[in-house]
Amino acid sequence: MTHNDPQTGHELAQVNISRLRFPLDSPELKDFVDGLEPVNAVADQAAGFVWRLQSDTGNATDVSVFGDDWLILNMSVWRDTDALTAFMYQGQHRELMARRREWFERVEEAMTALWWVPAGERPTVRDAEERLLHLREHGPTQRAFTLRRSFPAPAATD
């Protein structure tokens, strides 16, 4: 179910953090690291993709989140929930997700959050941290939500 109305002038921001089980340069994470570039290339061409956070490495694995070196971050902006979902459950991204327990710790607290941003606005790591903390404290709300319990984009203001 789509929650995007092009009239609202909003796009969907998403953050996903994961706690590594091994160092990024370890043999145990080789398949994951090797998959980053091809998966990011597919994302960059995906219908509804707008933007993703990347450092000089071309990905965001070296961007600090919550001051924890064992957490890695993925943050992007999409047209709507349908575009994000279509990308997540196809091809190589789906294959990597199927193996996530090999590479990442199982964590009880919310590690993904979605929120609407005005079209053209790019969220910061600080924004992502704040939205994750909000979701953990309050559950899904208009401010921070999940794909399972999403909220429509704010109405356009004149």
Image (cartoon, rainbow, N blue to C red):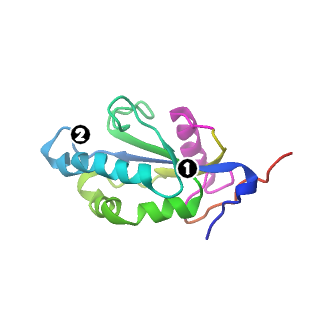
Local crowd size for mark 1, using a 10 Å CA cut-off: few (<14), some (14–19), many (≥20)? some
The answer to if 3 sits in the magenta stretch is no
- Tell me the magenta residue range: 121-147
Q: Position of residue 150 (x, y in %)?
A: 62, 61
The part of the image, by quadrant, that contains residue 139 is bottom right
Q: Which residue is mark 2?
A: 24
The part of the image, by quadrant, that contains residue 149 is bottom right
Q: Nearer the viewer, residue 47 or 125?
A: 47
Residue found at the far left of this picture: 27
Residue 105 seen by the camera: yes
Q: Are marks 1 and 2 in contact (CB under 8 Å)?
A: no
Of labels 1 and 2, the one closer to you: 2
- Dot 1 falls on a residue whose secondary structure is helix
Q: Which residue is mark 1?
A: 136
Q: Residue at x 49, y 52 (%)?
A: 110
Q: Residue at x 63, y 40 (%)?
A: 120
Q: Position of residue 55 (x, y in %)?
A: 39, 31
The answer to if 146 sits in the magenta stretch is yes
Q: Nearer the viewer, residue 19 or 38?
A: 38
Total marks shown come to 2
Local crowd size for mark 2, using a 10 Å CA cut-off: few (<14), some (14–19), many (≥20)? some
Going from the N terminus, do you reach mark 1 or mark 2 first? 2
Q: Is residue 57 above or below residue 38?
A: above
Which corner quadrant holds the N terminus?
Answer: bottom right
Q: Residue at x 67, y 55 (%)?
A: 141
Q: Amino acid at mark 2?
A: Leu
Q: Residue at x 16, y 41 (%)?
A: 26
Left or right position of 75 against 135: left
Q: Amino acid at mark 1?
A: Arg
Left or right position of 132 against 53: right
